[in-house]
Amino acid sequence: MDTVTVNDNCQSPADTAYEVKTRCTVEQIEALFDLPFNELIYRAQSVHRAHFDPNAVQLSTLLSIKTGGCPEDCGYCPQAARYNTGVDSQDTLSVAAVVAAARLAREKGATRFCMGAAWRGPKQRDLDQVIAMVQAVRGLGMETCATLGLLKEGQAEQLKAAGLDYYNHNIDTAPDFYGEIITTRTQRDRFDTLARVRAAGIHVCCGGIVGMGESRTSRAALIAQLANLDPYPESVPINNLVQVEGTPLHGIERLDLFEFVRTIACARIAMPKAMVRLSAGRRDMPEGIQALCFLAGANSIFYGEKLLTTGNPDVENDRALFARLGLRPMEPRGEERGEKREERGERGEGGGVS
Ligand code: SAM
Ligand code: DTB
Ligand code: SF4
C-alpha cells in the first residue's frame, strides 16, 4: 500500500466567513506542476479516490439567458460588446423558454442547470426575472446555478431565497495577470461578490481559464488563490480558452494539452473535496486527453451541444465516451461536499489505492 499524498495545507470546505488565507503557496502548487507527469497524475488520482467515486461524473447543462452586448472588456469573451465576434445579441429569455431548455437537459441526463447572462451585474429588474427562472427550474427537481456577474449588497440573499443552489463567479486568472485580460473591473470586485454569495449560504462555483498566454507560475497562482479561499469553492471549473475570432486573445499560442491535464491534477490535489469541472474547451480536446483529465481528478463536465455561445461535444459523443471509459453520471446529492460513496450507503466499483 502506497501512501496517499494529500496537501495538508488545504483544508476542507467549512461554514466559516469567506476570506483568503494562505494555506497553499504558489511555490507548493508550482512544485506539483513540475512533477513528472505520471507522478502528478498518480497523486491526483489517489487524492480523488480518497474522497470520490472515481467513476462518477456530474453533468451540468448551460444556457445563455441573456446573450452578448456586455459592457465589460474580458479579453477572452465573445459576448463583450466592444469586440466584433459575430455573436447575435439577445434579450433576456422568457421563463417559459428557460424551463423548456431545462426540461430537455433533464431528459438528456443533466442534474444541474446553469443560467448565464452577459451582464457586468444584474439590475433589480434583471434579478426579478432570474428569480422566476430559478424557482421554475427548481420546480423541475434540478439543481440550479446562475452566473450573472457582480452582485450588489442584498442580491445574493434574494437568489438564495429563490432556491439558487450555486453561483458561478470565476476569478479567471492569477492576480498579477488579471489586468492583462480585464480592465473594466478588478479581481477584488470578484472576491467581494464571492463573499456575498458565501455569506448568503449559496454554494460557490469558482474557477478560471488557462491557455490565455499565462505562465506556469500564473497557473499555479490561480490554483493557489482558489485553494486559499476559506472555505475553498465547492465547485471549480477549469476552462481551456475557447478562441473566438474578434476577441483580443484569438490566435494566441495554444496551451499544450498535457499542461491542461496538469492544471486539473493540481486543482484536485489542492482542493481535495471540491468538484473539479473539465469545462470549456472540450470540443477541441481529443478524447484521450479528456480521459486523462478524469484520471487526474476531474469529476464534472458541461453536458449539451452548447456552452453559452460556443460549441461543446454532442450528447451522443459524450454518452459513447462515458460507455467506453465505464463512467456514469453522478447522483445530485452529497458528493459536492466530497462525501464518499460508502457514507451515502451506495454501492460502487473500484476505490482504494494499492
Ligand atoms: N458575465 C458573467 C461573468 O463574467 O461572470 C457571467 C457569464 S461569463 C461568460 C462566465 C465565465 O465564462 C467567465 O468568467 C469565463 O471564465 C468563462 N468564459 C467566457 N468566455 C470564455 C472563453 N472564450 N473560453 C473559456 N471560458 C470563457
Ligand atoms: C465556466 O467556468 N465556464 C462556462 C460557465 N462557467 C458559465 C462558460 C464557458 C463559456 C465559453 C464561451 C462561450 O460559450 O461563450
Ligand atoms: Fe461580460 Fe462575463 Fe463576457 Fe466578461 S465574461 S465580457 S463580464 S459576459
Image (cartoon, rainbow, N blue to C red):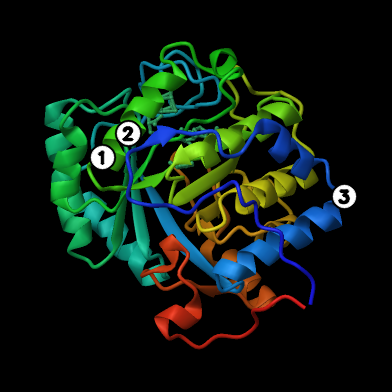
Q: Amino acid at mark 2?
A: Ala
State the count of labels: 3
Q: Is residue 309 left or right of residue 154?
A: right
Q: Farthest bottom residue? A: 347
Residue topped by disc 2: 195
Q: Position of residue 103 (x, y in %)?
A: 28, 64
Q: Farthest right residue? A: 36
* Label of residue 36 in the image: 3
Q: Are marks 1 and 2 in contact (CB under 8 Å)?
A: yes
Badge 3 or badge 2: first in the primary sequence = 3
Q: CA distance from mark 1 to mark 2?
A: 6 Å
Q: Position of residue 142 (x, y in %)?
A: 29, 64
* Label of residue 337 in the image: none
Q: Amino acid at mark 1?
A: Ala
Residue topped by disc 1: 199
Whether 279 is drawn above or below 120: the answer is below
Q: Is residue 120 left or right of residue 325?
A: left
